[in-house]
Image (cartoon, helix red, strand yellow):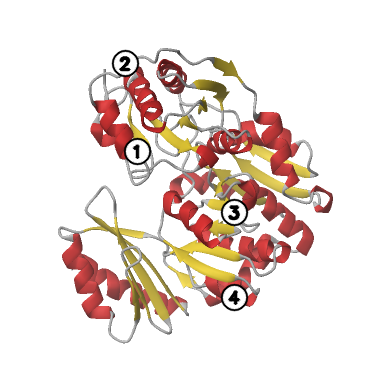
Amino acid sequence: MTLDPAIFKAYDVRGTVPDQLDPEGARRISRAYVEAFRPKRIAIGHDMRLSSPALAEAAIEGALAGGADVDVLGQIGTEMLYFAVAENGLDGGLIVTASHNPAEYNGMKIVRAGAQPVGSASGLNEVKAAALGEPLPDAARPGTATPVDVLPAYADKMLSLVDVAAMRELDVVLDGGSGMAGTMLGPVLERLPVRAVPFFLEPDGAFPDHQPNPLLEENRAFIEGKVREHPGALGIAWDGDADRCFFIDEDGEFVPGDFMTALLAEEVLRLHPGATILYDVRASRAVPDTVERCGGTAEVSRVGHAFIKVAMKETGGMFAGEVSGHYYFREFYGVDTGILPALLVLQLVSRSGRRLADLLTPLRERYHITGEINSPVPDVALKLQELKDRFGPGAAISHLDGISIDHPTWRFNVRPSNTEPLLRLNLEAQSAAGMAARRDEVLAVIRG
């Protein structure tokens, strides 16, 4: 049995196979999950990774041994698990996936009732302790496994959340990254007037074309080039388990997640006037400025889906977006989805009659952002204090997640990594020159 304690992260389970996680380790995690939460009926599925079927089979065995009944979902995207659990009133579930990580990785995303996340602060530490402890005994009555095809109902749900009749014939370049996006898109696209130019929509856990993480420049270079080869088309790419999506405008330019959050917030507020919109501490001022201009209430949150989902429930938020490409909708149980934001952008472009690039122009002209810049530091706490001492005077300061320092004409957030001695910088200013100068000034302190 291989089960490395290091694979239990803040929000999920993730490590390399088989040296950190093997099928018996997966069985133990699933059995421990049932022990910790005592669910009667759960769902289990898996992504397209080559190691996923064996790990999922072991996880199903563990849950059944603990006495839970299991809806066996087969190969799915992560949000299909969320849908199955929330829509069918299940007690929880898990998907075997390592999201955007390379092929040698695998792991689990675990949820409880309502598709709410199980993280280190919400039960994952208890699961970890039980999985790593003495083997748990089998229940007196083992559970039963039932195959369930959730895709048709999931597709219906997605399409019910947009105005299909308002969609125009749009040219769209799609990059599924050989992940799960193609599976979910199939029954959705066939009911839309979209002229799709598809690439890598067939799931392939070997990732023969590029790694399934479009947040990295080298992995989105392909779709950026293909968009430029198709005049007038916009581009959409997904990560491996397809719970994140990324946009390329018609000029072949990548759209940062905070700018997309601002555009999607405007569309949500058109449909739900006065709604509360959440954004993470890294985001550009473009988000709260847009929300307030459109009559909504903007609320800032810590980074990470576990925090965002809790904050959405606490605030009654209608929509939330993260710089990392995670988008959450109350109408989809308050969880992240990579398909719904893609559909809403198609709806927005259709309704406006304008290019996505043109809709973005006011944001790009006013808000100049660095994107996330990582720097290794020997002493994170000492460096954070140094940054506060150097740039804090005269600024509004927040310690919600790392340190956010807001001056009238520029701002930045610096957060420590959860797993490495790194600081992550996101900075913006009102001009490109000002952004570059302030970036260099702050980096000089971080790296000095």
Q: CA distance from mark 2 to mark 3?
A: 51 Å
> What's under tag 1, amino acid-wise?
Leu
Point out the tag, 1 or 4, that comes first from the N-terminus: 1
* Mark 3 burial class by Cα count in 10 Å: few <14, some 14-19, many 20+: many
- Identify the residue at image location x=35%, y=27%: 32
Looking at the picture, which amino acid does disc 4 mark? Glu
Residue mark closest to the camera, 2 vs 3: 2
Residue 381 in picture, x, y percent from top left: 19, 63
Element type at mark 4: helix
Q: Nearer the viewer, mark 1 or mark 3?
A: 1
Q: Nearer the viewer, mark 2 or mark 4?
A: 2
Q: Nearer the viewer, residue 134 or 347?
A: 134
Could you say which is closer to the camera, residue 94 or residue 447? 94
Question: In the image as oriented, which residue stretches furthest toward the front?
Answer: 140
The residue that mark 4 highlights is: 292
Real-space Cα separation, disc 1 to disc 4, in angstroms:
37 Å
> Which residue is labeled 1 in the image?
124
Foreground disc of the pair 1, 4: 1
> Could you tell me which residue is drawn at 20 percent across and 71 percent down?
385
- Which label sits on residue 137? 2
Q: Earlier in the sequence, mark 1 or mark 3?
A: 1
Which mark lies nearer to you, 1 or 2? 2
Whole-number angstrom distance, CA of label 1 to CA of label 3: 36 Å
Amino acid of disc 3:
Ile
State the mark number for residue 248: 3
Camera-side residue of 332 and 223? 332
- Give yes or no for contact between labels 1 and 2 (Cβ–Cβ under 8 Å): no
From the viewer's perspective, is residue 315 above or below residue 116?
below
User: SS class of the residue under badge 1?
Assistant: helix
Name above or below for residue 12 compared with residue 415. Answer: above
Position in image of residue 431 (x %, y %) = 47, 79
Question: Are discs 1 and 4 less than 8 Å apart at CB?
Answer: no
